[in-house]
Image (cartoon, rainbow, N blue to C red):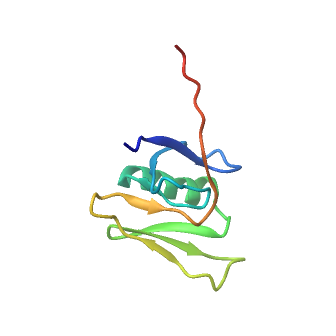
Amino acid sequence: MITMQLFTVEGSTYGPYGALPVSGDWWAYGPISVTRTTAELIAEDLNVRDAGCGLTAAWVGDDLVFTWGEPFVGMEDERIAPDADGRYQVGGLWPWIEVQTERSE
């Protein structure tokens, strides 16, 4: 059984975002599976909190499109369509880290 985990972008104050790792051998640049609501938060954080970083996010219908600007001209846009469950697999753009939470007993 795969359980929800919390992720953030390494070195940032983004999130944390509730997500599912896409595979059991997940790694920092691997995709995480998020809901539309969480994908909207990721896009907002990127566009507002990290404006000017060279990467922006926009919605084209139901697809989330990441576009590279200066100084990354020439890199291909990344278009992420929802999967059959309506989730977005976001990865490969920056390193994700799992947020460790303390549990009280």
Q: Residue furthest top?
A: 105
Locate residue 19, reporting x and y percent: 45, 47
Q: In this view of the protein, which residue sits in the foreground, 64 or 4? A: 4
Locate residue 103, reporting x and y percent: 54, 22
Indicate the quadrant containing the N terminus: top left, top right, bottom left or bottom right. top left
Which residue appears at 27% of the width and 63% of the height? 84
Locate residue 13, reporting x and y percent: 65, 44
Q: Is residue 73 left or right of residue 80?
A: right
Q: Is 22 rendered above or below residue 56?
A: above
Which residue appears at 62% of the width and 82% of the height? 75
Q: How many marks?
A: 0
Q: In this view of the protein, which residue sits in the foreground, 31 or 70? A: 31
Q: Is 5 rendered above or below residue 75?
A: above
Q: Is 15 rendered above or below residue 39?
A: above
Q: Is 6 rendered above or below residue 44?
A: above
Q: In this view of the protein, which residue sits in the foreground, 55 or 7? A: 7
Q: Residue furthest bottom?
A: 74
Locate residue 97, reporting x and y percent: 62, 48
